[in-house]
Image (spheres, helix red, strand yellow):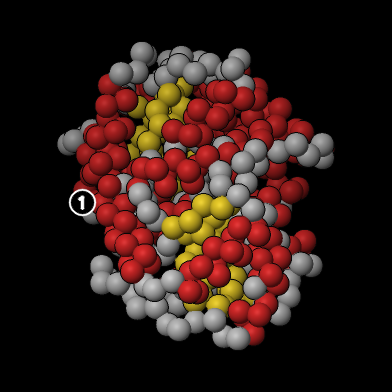
């Protein structure tokens, strides 16, 4: 038997990666039941994406997602997750569970997962997400320093039975190069599982309009360098005014980034929830997705879910150069453009405006092939090869 627990991300958060990981585990541990512990809303969301539900036995807890967004809820959140984790480990011991997988956990809780794994002598996988990105931040803010030290302590106290699962080989390499004192034994690195199905598009190419639409998707934040989107749009002001290019932000924008906004970027549904059907409708209007993650930033150690959105919706990429994107550009072929500066991005857009659509169609073809190369079936083989080599 295998236990899968999502302690931190509730409701529809991480539903694509978690449903993908469940499919990988189900195929890896064929005919073994998977007990899933998650909040009641997350169960509903997962059920939309997983088949063969007979393999899964759900145990749900109360949804607390919105209440725990407050900074004042840190202690309450840690206590809730810790109590749940203890019950899960106790249950795993009683049922002689082969493996416990934590899809995510609050950094403070992760330290206790180390302790519980040691206490119950339980083989455990902890999946690493954006939380470890704080190790790349150079800010001296008190909360950043506390989180950074907590996460360092988690890595330094990790026992042999706790396996780290990275969503990207470059993230693992970057972490251990940056912190050689961290124990790098018993790790697994796989491509980010993702649900590439969508009702809004098919494998047929989406025809471009005369106006090239460039979209920045997801929440606009300073640690994503989202403010540079407005700087780029201003550099393209003549092309915007002449109806050759359009810039849209699909997702909320932080107040700090909003202070950089200008009339050359259209913001869709700022400060309001975007229903998924509207989100898909808006992203399908775009011709390109754009990214501003730089090297030596938060996203050195943080997998970009929106990168895989580009693959899903077959949108060629314009991005600043960083290790994560460089790795996938080499792996997947011509899927867009990597640039060293915002100025080079602007020059690239000028070239795109002048070019014919042949290069664009080649990029869409590469993106179409990429979703097959990064299928859950292929990731499952990658996962199992590494799992069998673990020294536990």
Identify the residue shown where x is 58% and y is 39%: 300
Give residue 162's position: percent from left, percent from top.
Answer: 46, 22
Q: Nearer the viewer, residue 388 or 114?
A: 388
* Visible residue check, residue 150: yes
Q: Secondary structure at mark 1?
A: loop
Identify the residue shown where x is 50% and y is 27%: 173
* Visible residue check, residue 67: no
Give residue 8's position: percent from left, percent from top.
Answer: 54, 44
In the picture, which quadrant includes the N terminus? top left
In the picture, which quadrant includes the C terminus? top left
Give residue 96's position: percent from left, percent from top.
Answer: 31, 22
| Crowding near the residue tagged with mark 1, few <14, some 14–19, many ≥20 C-alpha atoms within 10 Å | few
Relative vertical location of residue 307 with respect to residue 201 in this rendering, above or below: above
Q: Nearer the viewer, residue 255 or 25?
A: 255
Find the residue positioned furthest to the left.
Answer: 31
User: Could you say which quadrant of the image residue 130 lies in?
Assistant: top right
Identify the residue shown where x is 27% and y is 38%: 380
Relative vertical location of residue 376 with respect to residue 33 in this rendering, above or below: below
Give residue 306's position: percent from left, percent from top.
Answer: 49, 56
Relative vertical location of residue 161 with respect to residue 275 in this rendering, above or below: above
Q: Nearer the viewer, residue 380 or 222?
A: 222
Residue 324 appears left or right of 208? right
Find the residue positioned furthest to the bottom.
Answer: 242
User: Could you say which quadrant of the image residue 147 lies in?
Assistant: top right
Give the residue pinned by disc 1: 52
Identify the residue shown where x is 71% and y is 65%: 231
Q: How many marks?
A: 1
């Amino acid at each position: 038997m295998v236990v899968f627990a999502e302690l931190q991300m509730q409701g529809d958060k991480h539903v694509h990666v978690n449903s993908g990981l469940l499919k990988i585990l189900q195929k890896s541990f064929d005919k073994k039941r998977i007990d899933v512990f998650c909040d009641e809303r997350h169960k509903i969301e997962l059920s939309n994406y997983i088949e063969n539900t007979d393999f899964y036995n759900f145990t749900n807890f109360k949804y607390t997602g919105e209440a725990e967004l407050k900074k004042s809820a840190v202690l309450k959140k840690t206590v809730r997750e810790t109590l749940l984790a203890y019950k899960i480990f106790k249950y795993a011991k009683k049922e002689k569970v082969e493996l416990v997988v934590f899809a995510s956990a609050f950094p403070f809780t992760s330290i206790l997962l180390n302790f519980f794994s040691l206490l119950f002598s339980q083989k455990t996988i902890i999946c690493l997400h954006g939380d470890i990105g704080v190790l790349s931040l150079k800010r001296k803010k008190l909360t950043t320093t506390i989180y950074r030290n907590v996460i360092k302590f988690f890595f330094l106290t990790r026992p042999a039975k706790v396996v780290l699962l990275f969503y990207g080989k470059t993230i693992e390499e970057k972490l251990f190069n940056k912190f050689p004192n961290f124990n790098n034994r018993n790790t697994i690195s796989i491509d980010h599982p993702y649900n590439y199905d969508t009702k809004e598009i098919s494998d047929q190419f989406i025809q471009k309009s005369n106006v090239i639409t460039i979209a920045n998707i997801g929440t606009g934040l300073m640690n994503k360098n989202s403010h540079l989107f407005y700087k780029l749009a201003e550099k393209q002001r003549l092309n915007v005014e002449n109806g050759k290019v359009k810039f849209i932000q699909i997702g909320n924008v932080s107040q700090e980034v909003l202070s950089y906004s200008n009339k050359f970027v259209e913001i869709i549904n700022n400060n309001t929830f975007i229903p998924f059907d509207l989100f898909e409708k808006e992203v399908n209007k775009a011709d390109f997705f754009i990214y501003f993650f730089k090297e030596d930033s938060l996203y050195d150690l943080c997998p970009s879910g929106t990168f895989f959105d580009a693959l899903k919706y077959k949108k060629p990429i314009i991005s600043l150069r960083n290790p994560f994107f460089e790795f996938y550009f080499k792996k997947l072929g011509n899927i867009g453009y990597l640039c060293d500066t915002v100025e080079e991005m602007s020059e690239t857009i000028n070239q795109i405006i002048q070019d014919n659509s042949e290069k664009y169609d080649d990029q869409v073809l590469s993106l179409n092939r990429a979703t097959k190369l990064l299928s859950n079936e292929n990731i499952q083989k990658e996962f199992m090869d590494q799992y069998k080599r673990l020294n536990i």
